[in-house]
Image (cartoon, rainbow, N blue to C red):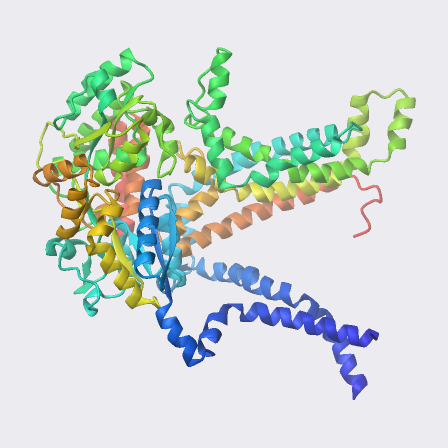
Amino acid sequence: MGKNSKKIWSIGLVMALSIGMLSGCGQTEEQTSGKTDETQEEDTKNVSFRYEWWGGSATHEAYTNLQAKYKELKPEVTIEPEYSAFDGYQEKVVTQLSGGTVADLFHIDVPWMDEWVERGDYFTDLYEQDILDYSGIDDELLEQYCVYDGKLLAVPMGVQASGMLLNTVAAEKYGVPTDHQLTWDEILELGEKIHSENPDVYFFTADRGNVLNAIVAMLKQRTGGQLINDDYTIAFSKDDLLYVYNIIQKAYEVGVFEPLGEADLYYGSSTPNPKWINGQSIAQLCWNSEFTKSDDLLEGADKATMVLWPTITENVNQGATRIRPTYLVALSSQSQAKDAALEYLNWQLNDEEASVILGSCRAVPTTKTQQDAAVEAGVLRQPVIDLMDEAYPDAQEKDNVPSQNSELTDALTDEYSKVAYGMATPKEAVESTFAALEEVLERISVE
Amino acid sequence: MKIKWKKRLGKYQGLFYIAPWLVGFLGLQLYPFLASLYYSFTDYAMMGTPKWVGLENFITIFTKDRDFKNSLEVTLIYVLIAVPLKLIFALFIAMLLNLKVKGIGIFRTVYYLPSILGGSVAIAVLWRFLFSGEGTVNTILSKLGIGPVGWLSNPKVALFTLSLLAVWQFGSSMVIFLAALKNVPAELYESARVDGASPVRCFWSITIPLITPTILFNMVMQLVTAFQEFTGAFVITSGGPMKSTYLYILKVYDEAFKYYKMGYACALSWILFGVVMIFTLIIFRTSSKWVFYSDGGDTV
């Protein structure tokens, strides 16, 4: 081979590589457009779509089993699962929505929905289709959480209530009652006694998200309505906040809460806090959808139970419990397999067998058929159902948009942390909290 | 005609060869680089269309942002702890691995392993287990009657613990130091020993001066990497406790993905770019005073 031929060959190869790289992105389109009728017909049979969710190992197992079952029923449908822990999920989906690469079906946490709907046309209007049957879901639930400008943009898979999850063995050992809602005063008294006698044992292991929820619930009990008003002003008074911060300060001081720095290492993580596993923590503040995960971490079965979220005792203007959808499922407006995805979602939402496979990882199913099937099969653990029944009379008002703003809740977290770490007195923290919240509110109200 | 074609071919041949890299550079580096500069002057929520706001993002950062100063300070402290410690440790291990010992190849491989694993999420999780309140480190210390230490839960200690994770990933610097140590002429040590120089004197008067170009290189590279540290702080502490490990990149991440303020995050990134540039320039400017080139440094 002559010198010039070598050059020409090398250039040819490099060009081919470059073109290959450049055309990589358009490959699917080319392949689709170049198909014969026969292949196209085959493709209408063999369809695949992506399904994206967050959760712990129990949720991942439930959903992968569910999708394997669907594959048995419909071998021509392939569901590509994409799952991760809660931490980072929101950021991942935001990026995907922005880049147009979100999965066909994806889970959404309730507080994110308002923001995402406002930012673009990312969801399919489920009123405009007749494959998914959502008639079994309570109209009020759909109206409150899924309908925007007359469009049904998602469906709730389950309903959950916030509550106090107790390790029954540890509770019995340390004399904590497990049959009724406790007040914060009772918890402080019991927790102090337990920790002073057993320095390694704490009443709660609570990360910054759990403690924030506790603070918000207490403040909402005091206001009788929202944390932040619809006009972006603070709904609670300085006295309300001082009352709450005094409880938080005492809870950390006497060892009711595990020190925040330690408990927070497990924030949003798929790895559990060892104190819970070892029985050195008696209770958790969580949603009943998390019951299975926490219960399974204890040795043997049925060692956990749930009671209502703790309540305050002074100036109580509403209940302490929050009720909301566990998560919503939406169909991307960009989906290329809408019919297949909707058929699957319809099965997942309404089928009795699907309900049994999903168990209680989404708390209580939103459709009556699935609720009955899950209860009959015994997969919905009793404490999850019991808490749900008790929660409705103790329910708080649904959070409005301003109260769910993440900059605002982060600012509140930063401020109460000062009390939790003993770096500010409750009185000092009240002043700095108001200053911080007002600064954020001023900014977000004009955005 | 044929000659003309060959001439043209010769002219563009190089470009064809680098075409794959060029495409990658233009699409994955230059475009994002310039786009981020544009976005830094916009109100861009990622989801939606950017709106031009001029210098507003920069003004807000310097005048109103409560976390900007803190995250910059935390990052500077992190860099000042992690970079020197890492360089010292890498040089120390490189010197050990420069000894003529049986099976030294195995030692070199083993000591490089942390660098392969070090930046991963799995190792960050492992680090959390090691340094948590009831983790391995505190268990060992308690056997010695020390502690427990709040390695990750004490705001005054957590940043140092995170720095240790960076130090642990010393492998790449170590390999470069090892190569530099091997290039130090053995006869210099022999002459010094004949003149009665101690090993310590040899280290300070021969080894260090001759490897200063490598120290400079490693320092700049590690400085740039340390300013961009993310994984450890994100996975292990999420910036806590009390924002004591809230590194700058964590703030950029929060602004972009949590608060949907991509334009603002881009402005923060350009400020970081400026800070890194200033530090790099200072190092280069001062290098003429402490870096020794055996050829006088005139080859560039």
The one of A14 and B167 positioned closer to us in this rendering: A14
Q: Is residue A199 visible?
A: yes
**Figure check: A368 above or below A153:** above
**Figure check: A129 above or below B231:** below
Q: How many marks?
A: 0
Whole-percent x, y for residue A187 in the image: 19, 22
**Figure check: A30 above or below A190:** below
Whole-percent x, y for residue B269 in the image: 49, 51
The one of B108 and B170 positioned closer to us in this rendering: B108
**Figure check: A211 above or below A131:** above
As drawn, is B257 to the left or to the right of B13? left
Whole-percent x, y for residue B166 in the image: 56, 35
Look at the image and tell me in which quarter the N terminus of chain B lies. Answer: bottom right
The one of A205 and B204 positioned closer to us in this rendering: A205
Q: Hey, which quadrant is residue A359 in on the image?
A: top left
Which residue: 80% across, 36% down? Answer: B182
Q: Is residue A421 visible?
A: no
The one of B55 and A246 positioned closer to us in this rendering: A246
Q: Hey, which quadrant is residue A446 in on the image?
A: bottom left
Whole-percent x, y for residue B229 in the image: 52, 42
As drawn, is B163 to the left or to the right of B244? right
